[in-house]
Amino acid sequence: MFKRFYNMASNPFSKELAAADAHKTEDIVQVHKRLDHLVRTGGIGLLTADPGMGKTFAVRSWAAKLNPNTSKLIYICMSTVTNMEFYRKLCYGLGLEPYFKKSDMDRDIQACIRNLADDKAVRVVIVIDEAQYLPSSVLRDLQIK
């Protein structure tokens, strides 16, 4: 109804909005610059804001611009996972076959990331949307890496 009233071609608030169609606010530009810096320098970053402020969209629009030749993006949006599910999601994101044992998956994940970084100069970027719901055991595993 509002699209017709305002003569809009599409819903500007849709979750399917293409990154190229978004209005580039200063906030989104700053988020993109900070995420670019994080990819260049490595480490763990945290993006916080009130619900509905566009965190997911900002990350999604930034990720759409990543060069697949220099960055490998793994996006995990279901954050209510067990440690094993988390490791499986990492395996799938890296194109690895998950094992039944966490130690086997960890070994393959580490080898794959080292291979991508050392041999192919590719940075692995892991985005965990709604990470506040992750169990502390998953966060402890991330801390070790």
Image (cartoon, grey):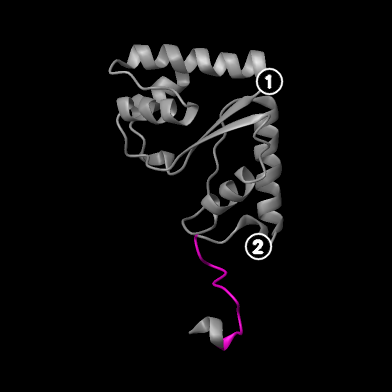
To which residue does mark 1 refer?
A: 121
Label 1 and label 2: CA atoms lie apart by 31 Å
Mark seen at residue 21: 2
In the rendered view, would you say 49 is above or below 109? below
Residue 145 shows in the view: no
> Residue at position x 29%, y 15% from top?
101
Q: Position of residue 40 (x, y in %)?
A: 70, 28
Residue 63 shows in the view: yes
Secondary structure beneath dot 1 equals loop
For the residue marked with disc 1, what is the amino acid?
Answer: Ala
For the residue marked with disc 2, what is the amino acid?
Answer: Asp
> Residue at position x 46%, y 21% from top?
143
> Residue at position x 65%, y 46% from top?
31
Q: Position of residue 65 (x, y in %)?
A: 67, 44
131 or 118, which lies in front? 118
Looking at the image, tell me whether mark 1 or mark 2 is earlier in sequence order: 2
Q: Position of residue 103 (x, y in %)?
A: 35, 12
Label 2 crowd bin: few (<14), some (14–19), many (20+), radius 10 Å: few
Q: In this view, which residue lies farthest toward the bottom?
A: 5
Secondary structure beneath dot 2 equals helix
Label 1 crowd bin: few (<14), some (14–19), many (20+), radius 10 Å: few
Q: Position of residue 80 (x, y in %)?
A: 32, 39
In the rendered view, would you say 72 is above or below 6? above
In the rendered view, would you say 17 is above or below 143? below
Q: Which residues are magenta?
A: 5-15
Magenta stretch prevailing secondary structure? loop
